[in-house]
Image: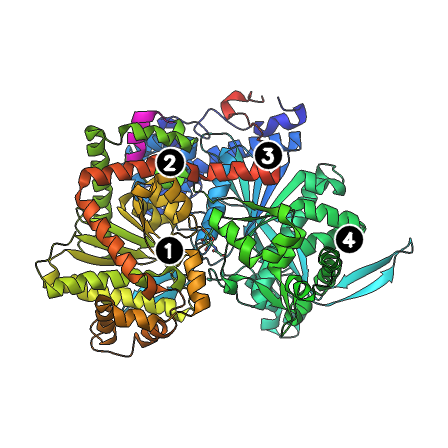
């Protein structure tokens, strides 16, 4: 029972009416009212988007009721809270998700249908909030879903980018980027909170002074001030009353108009500051697994981190808790190094603004933060040139020097005389131009460091962070990633969800391990039949969509062989292309050859500045053009590139997949999470021993997984001993033919230049070992083709994949973070119906 002061969150608010009611009638009435009063439209004038907005607002009212209840409960209980700091949150559309969480999907469908409208069409109106690049941002979104579902008090903190990840279009097979104006028609899910705006400073210099107590202190004299304004989105757990908050910051100028400039005739100058300030949260950097030393990027990182820490201090102080309890109140997770500057900022706030001494401030800081590393690629490890850093954050530079000074002393004690180790561990890279190493700052400032899959964590310990592991072995943990079954099964694959629920009840949605019970039906012919029919029906739905989008007709009975992820050479989309060309060459050499019909589906974006990745997209489209048109192929092979891959599109693809391509070079992919979504939806994986593939294979059983390729150890060894891709080219006629066909201009209207850089790279360097893995991949694909023809065997494998992937739920991952890193317990929020209405 809440204390009296916090009871009346609903005081005076109508509860049983259509404002928050959950019957079909209530929902219909709420929808019509919102259309009229919020959208200012009546049906004859309303657009589909108006209908979407009206429905979204009707649903939001129900969310707000739970959100207020949650906030009141957390406030009353002074709950320990997880703050998930992430520069990216790839949330996906909210309407469908919220209907599922509230348990009113079918009722809303009926309410909407009774007005002769189609719920699917309204769901389709919601623009994708593309505030992330790929795996890292989507993981953050899955984790927020699990936090709310597990009833853990949590806040997601990030940036409200005005433009999210670019929209990908294709022109003549090349990627072209278009601005993502996702906020253009408004965002019904967010609430602006200007009253909680905070000031963030940049630039200037530092000086020192003696305070009244005679203490030596440092003062930062900044040059620029920006306002951070929070926008809150409620995130409701699956069929719980817990609605946590995603708090995203927008940058605004403190004064949006300078009258002095205006009066003196400088009209542009009058709005200059506004323009400069707003730039900070203007656009998401469209890079994934690569770091760019750009000033604006560092500005963004510091901006959201500073806003968030100040916000947390406001909450702490509001609850009358002393600063010394900061780490008891909050557990902060740093999602990669993007928010790592938080370590220096919290120190600065505690030292300079709250006058704690160094030891207390450092103890609080280290007990507050934990750091997740998401990459093994050296080019993705962020570092900032000292000059740039010092210009933007001069006081933080001082703080970092002092942290480093003390840390290096610690290293000296543990490893006396090991100067090389000191240089490797230092927060400052002094091997050439001087840089700040953000991963080092995160490692030193955090109590726990984790990798995102078992292999990844091992490689961090042995390789990328080996010196930190030697220094602080107790800090290292593994937390294998997970995905939310609510979005990637319940919402996107209703047919399979219903079948599973019929068989094993509905508890699996929150306890995904229960999928194991499906094993009992893996050989049951009736169940197998239904399983197959459902997969076929999902493939039919996708085939219709593919035709609408691309004009390409695909056969739902063919194997849907899907590779969807960001484009990167290490992810080796071009290895898949070599397989397609090999099959094509075989057909050309022997038109009657028996080949398992396949539809190859690709999707994914390339970073706009990553030229090689864009060339691989062009190659796929060029090969598609030739293969899809060639009458000799007679529909046995189809190649489809689905443009603008995003969460929305992903939800159509996973349910329809037969084969999931997870073919990165071993030792390169930290985890992967698409691999989990596919397996959960009953797709079989062809993959290397990389990232979480290793654990997926362990779970589903080696006999239900198509393994190929070099191991990480073999890759390291070959690299050390000298690898010569030419040897593979010379020795393998099929490989040679495939590469020669590309080189000859066969897929490029006779142009022999266009793919030359790609081919030269493969023949001379091949840093990702495509040629070395080619034959093993081709052989494995042959097995896949044969297995697919044996429908009973394939279906059994498919069922077992779903049945055995329960451990890859984000609920399991979050529970591990709660137990092993955050030390946090759930807090029960009463369902609205259980709360007495205040009169
Ligand atoms: O590349 C990793 C991917 O393997 C992993 O699944 C994902 C979530 O942990 O993070 C990706 N990393 C990045 O996007 C940036 O380092």
Q: Callout 3: helix, strand or loop?
A: helix
- Identify the magenta region: 496-506
Residue mark closest to the camera, 3 vs 1? 1
Coloring basis for residues? rainbow
Calculate the distance from the C-alpha at mark 2 to the C-alpha at mark 4: 54 Å
Q: Which residue is mark 3?
A: 71
Residue mark closest to the camera, 3 vs 4? 4
Q: Which residue is mark 4?
A: 351
Q: Pointer 1: residues within 10 angstroms few (<14), some, or many (20+)? A: many
Q: Is residue 580 above or below residue 312?
A: below
Residue depicted at x 41% and y 56%: 666
Percent position of residue 741, x then y: 21, 72
Calculate the distance from the C-alpha at mark 3 to the C-alpha at mark 4: 30 Å
Which comes sooner in the sequence, label 1 or label 4?
4
Q: Nearer the viewer, residue 32 or 679?
A: 679
Percent position of residue 538, x then y: 24, 42
Calculate the distance from the C-alpha at mark 2 to the C-alpha at mark 3: 29 Å
Quarter of the figure with the N terminus: top right
Which comes sooner in the sequence, label 2 or label 1?
2
Question: Going by the image, does 503 lie left or right of 84?
Answer: left
Question: Going by the image, does 185 lie left or right of 310?
Answer: left
Determine which quarter of the picture holds residue 570. bottom left
Calculate the distance from the C-alpha at mark 1 to the C-alpha at mark 4: 43 Å
Q: CB of mark 2 within 8 Å of CB of mark 4? A: no
């Amino acid at each position: 029972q809440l204390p009296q002061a916090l009871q009346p969150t609903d005081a005076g608010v109508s509860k049983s009416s259509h404002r928050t009611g959950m019957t079909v009638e209530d929902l219909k009435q709420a929808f019509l009212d919102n259309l009229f009063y919020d959208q200012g439209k009546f049906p004859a004038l309303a657009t589909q988007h108006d209908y979407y907005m009206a429905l979204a607002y009707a649903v939001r009212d129900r969310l707000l009721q739970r959100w207020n209840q949650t906030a009141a409960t957390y406030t009353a209980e002074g709950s320990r809270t997880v703050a998930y700091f992430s520069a990216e949150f790839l949330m996906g559309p909210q309407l469908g998700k919220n209907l599922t969480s509230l348990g009113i999907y079918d009722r809303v469908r009926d309410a909407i249908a009774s007005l002769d409208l189609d719920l699917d069409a309204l769901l389709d109106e919601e623009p994708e909030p593309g505030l992330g690049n790929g795996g890292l941002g989507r993981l953050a979104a899955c984790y927020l879903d699990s936090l709310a579902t597990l009833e853990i008090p949590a806040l997601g903190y990030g940036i409200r980018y005005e433009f999210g990840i670019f929209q990908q279009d294709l022109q003549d097979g090349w990627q072209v980027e278009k601005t993502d104006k996702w906020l253009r028609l408004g965002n019904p899910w967010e609430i602006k909170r200007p009253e909680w705006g905070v000031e963030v400073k940049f630039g200037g210099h530092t000086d020192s002074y003696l305070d009244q107590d005679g203490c030596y202190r440092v003062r930062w004299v900044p040059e620029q001030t920006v306002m951070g304004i929070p926008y809150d989105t409620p995130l409701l757990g699956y069929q719980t009353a817990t609605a946590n908050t995603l708090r995203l910051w927008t940058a605004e100028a403190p004064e949006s108009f300078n009258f002095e400039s205006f009066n003196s005739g400088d009209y542009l100058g009058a709005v200059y500051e506004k323009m400069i300030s707003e730039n900070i949260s203007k656009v998401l950097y469209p890079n994934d697994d690569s770091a760019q030393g750009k000033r604006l990027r560092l500005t963004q990182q510091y901006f959201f981190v500073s806003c968030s820490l100040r916000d947390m201090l406001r909450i702490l102080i509001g609850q009358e808790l002393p600063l010394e309890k900061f780490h008891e109140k909050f557990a902060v997770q740093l999602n990669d190094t993007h928010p790592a500057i938080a370590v220096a900022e919290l120190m600065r706030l505690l030292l300079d603004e709250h006058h704690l001494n160094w030891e207390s401030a450092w103890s609080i800081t280290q007990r507050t933060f934990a750091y997740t590393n998401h990459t093994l690629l050296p080019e993705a490890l962020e570092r900032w040139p000292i000059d740039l850093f010092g210009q933007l954050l001069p006081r933080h530079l001082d703080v970092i020097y002092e942290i480093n000074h003390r840390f290096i002393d610690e290293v000296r004690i543990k490893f006396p005389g090991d100067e090389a180790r000191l240089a490797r561990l230092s927060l400052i890279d002094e091997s050439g131009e001087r840089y700040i190493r953000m991963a080092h700052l995160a490692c030193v400032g955090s109590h726990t460091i984790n990798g995102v899959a078992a292999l990844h964590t091992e490689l961090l310990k042995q390789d990328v962070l080996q010196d930190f592991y030697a220094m602080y072995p107790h800090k290292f943990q593994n937390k294998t990633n997970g995905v939310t079954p609510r979005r990637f099964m319940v919402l996107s694959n209703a047919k399979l969800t219903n079948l599973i629920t019929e068989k094993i009840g509905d508890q699996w949605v929150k306890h995904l391990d229960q999928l194991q019970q499906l094993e009992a039906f893996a050989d049951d012919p009736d169940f197998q039949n239904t399983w197959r029919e459902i997969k076929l029906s999902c493939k039919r739905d996708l085939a219709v969509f593919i035709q609408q989008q691309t004009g390409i007709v695909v056969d739902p009975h063919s194997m849907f062989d899907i590779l969807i992820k960001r484009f990167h050479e290490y992810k080796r989309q071009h290895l898949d292309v070599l397989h397609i060309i090999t099959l094509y060459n075989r057909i050309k050499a022997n038109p009657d050859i028996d080949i398992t019909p396949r539809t190859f589906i690709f999707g994914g974006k390339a970073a706009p500045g990553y030229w090689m990745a864009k060339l691989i997209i062009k190659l796929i489209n060029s090969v598609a053009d030739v293969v899809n048109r060639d009458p000799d192929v007679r529909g046995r092979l189809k190649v489809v590139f689905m443009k603008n891959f995003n969460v929305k599109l992903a939800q159509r693809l996973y349910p329809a997949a037969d084969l999931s391509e997870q073919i990165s070079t071993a030792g390169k992919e930290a985890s992967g999470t698409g691999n989990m979504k596919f397996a959960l939806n009953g797709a079989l994986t062809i993959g290397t021993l990389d990232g979480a593939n290793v654990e997926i294979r362990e779970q589903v059983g080696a006999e239900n997984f198509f393994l190929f390729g070099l191991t990480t150890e073999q890759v390291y060894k070959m690299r050390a001993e000298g690898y010569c891709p030419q040897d593979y080219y010379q020795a393998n006629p099929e490989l040679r033919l495939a590469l020669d066909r590309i080189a000859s201009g066969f897929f490029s209207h006779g142009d022999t230049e266009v793919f030359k850089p790609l081919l030269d790279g493969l023949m001379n360097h091949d840093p990702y070992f495509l040629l070395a893995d080619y034959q093993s991949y081709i052989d494995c694909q042959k097995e896949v083709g044969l297995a697919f023809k044996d429908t009973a065997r394939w279906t059994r494998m498919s069922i077992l994949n779903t049945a055995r992937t329960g451990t890859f739920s984000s609920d399991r991952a979050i529970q591990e973070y709660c137990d092993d890193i955050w030390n946090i317990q759930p807090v029960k929020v009463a369902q609205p119906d259980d709360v007495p209405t205040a009169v």
